[in-house]
Image (spheres, rainbow, N blue to C red):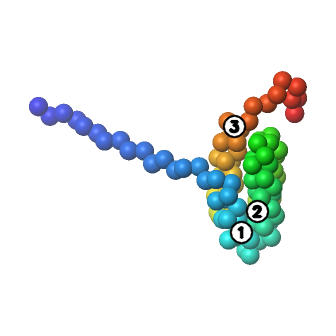
Amino acid sequence: EDVDRRQWSRVITPTPTLTEIEARLKSLSQQHRSFDRARKEIGKAIREAEESDFEAAIKKALKAIDRLDKIDRDDARSVHMAIARAIRVLAMRWTPSAGDDD
């Protein structure tokens, strides 16, 4: 009996932490000043997240993405996507209060 067996594999890429993203941006900072500006925003996001202010951390991470959008390079797009995934993790940890309208 000939049975068609297929093996499916899925590569799961772990979401980089903000600290890992900050280190990557530091290594790129000599290539374009916007990498350094993005790194500074990610540093602020880290501090906000450490204080459990996930809304503020998300806003800082979005500012970092804005800085990267000034760079038309693959490495900038790659870091942009890493920050987007990190924002998703922050958003899952953030519980807006009933009075939040922002």
Tags 1 and 2 in contact by the CB under 8 Å rule?
yes
Residue 88 percent across, percent down from the top left: 67, 41
Q: Which mark is residue 26?
A: 1
Q: Quadrant of the N terminus?
A: top left
Q: Nearer the viewer, mark 3 or mark 2?
A: 3
Q: Quadrant of residue 9?
A: top left
Q: Nearest the camera: 8 or 72?
A: 8
Seen at 54% across and 50% down, the residue is: 14
Badge 3: residue crowd in 10 Å (few <14, some 14–19, many ≥20): some
Residue 25 percent across, percent down from the top left: 70, 65
Eyeballing the image, is 69 above or below 35?
above
Tags 1 and 3 in contact by the CB under 8 Å rule?
no
Seen at 88% across and 25% down, the residue is: 99
Marks 1 and 2, the one that precedes in the sequence: 1
Label 3, on which residue?
93
Label 2, on which residue?
39
